[in-house]
Image (cartoon, helix red, strand yellow):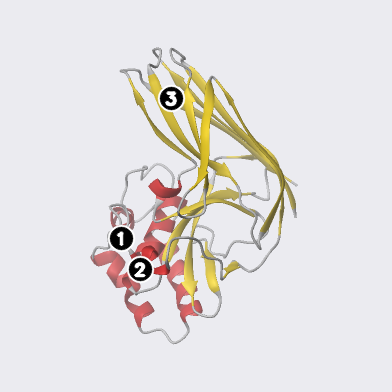
Amino acid sequence: MQLSINHTTRYCYDAPVDYALQQVRLTPPNTAQQDVRDWALSVDGGTIETQYRDHNGTQVHLVSVDPGAQEIAITAAGEVETTDTAGVLGKVYGPAPLWYFLQSTALTEAGPGIRALAGELAEASDMLGALHALSSSIRMAAPYKIGETYAATTAENALMGGSGVCQDHAQIFVAAARVAGVPARYVSGYLMMDDRVDQDASHAWAEAHVEGLGWVGFDASNGISPDDRYVRLAVGLDYRHAAPISGMRLGASNESMIVSLQIQQ
């Protein structure tokens, strides 16, 4: 499937900014699931200082805000040819070893709720089937609901709260998989919704490493494995490691953000 993507994130400040630096993870990689035909990152109100590939294989751009600016817009746009592999990325490995993806983080620390979800995984004879069952269990235990969680909500708190969004579902999944000894990671990217061009936001899902298959994706929010409507951008241990944009700024200004995202065939 040929997908055309245009994604602009605009930050507005109520006072001039002395200094701000953003880590931008908005460049899709070439994989067995996607072929990037054309892609460009542009900035209005700031400068791309440098770029590098991190230990997870994610392309990262460092973007500074022009001194004294009160607005910056970061736009990523291009064309990606996608292939439905039933969620299987395969035996693709970077500098980070598999044991790295068994580590918990502040956002994915397992509590009683997540440990209970992970109970059947550790003894599973069919790991792939058990992981699909885990994805379904997460969707039932914490149905998709906007406005109940935020960026700093932990996986355990989202599960105990009984609702969440894609970020929460992905973090619950990776936390439960890791408790059972299955390497797992958080993936950020895009999902083209079938009924619209304008999308509400970028998307997130999880990947687990299954013996014999390699990395396999699970989107608990939608109850499926990623297909040719998905485009991956970044991976990491949790949201903070793979967020499309993250950063810091100096000064007392307040910030607001507007996101515009269009995806179409």
Q: In the image, residue 162 lies at what x, y percent?
A: 34, 56
Q: Which quarter of the figure has residue 42?
A: top right
Q: Residue at x 46, y 67 (%)?
A: 135
Q: In the image, residue 154 lies at what x, y percent?
A: 31, 52
Secondary structure category for the residue under label 2: helix
> What's the mark number on residue 28?
none
Secondary structure category for the residue under label 3: strand
Marks 1,2: beta carbons within 8 A? yes
The residue closer to the viewer here, 189 or 31, is 31
The amino acid at mark 1 is Ser
> What's the mark number on residue 256?
3
How many neighbours does mark 1 have within 10 angstroms: few (below 14), some (14-19), or many (20 or more)?
some
What residue does disc 1 label?
Answer: 104
The amino acid at mark 3 is Ser
Q: Residue at x 47, y 71 (%)?
A: 209
The amino acid at mark 2 is Arg
> What's the mark number on residue 178?
2
Q: CA distance from mark 3 to mark 2?
A: 35 Å
| Mark 3 or mark 2, earlier in chain | 2
The residue closer to the viewer here, 84 or 56, is 56
The residue closer to the viewer here, 53 or 40, is 53
**Above or below 239: residue 63:** above
The residue closer to the viewer here, 80 or 92, is 92
| Mark 1 or mark 2, earlier in chain | 1
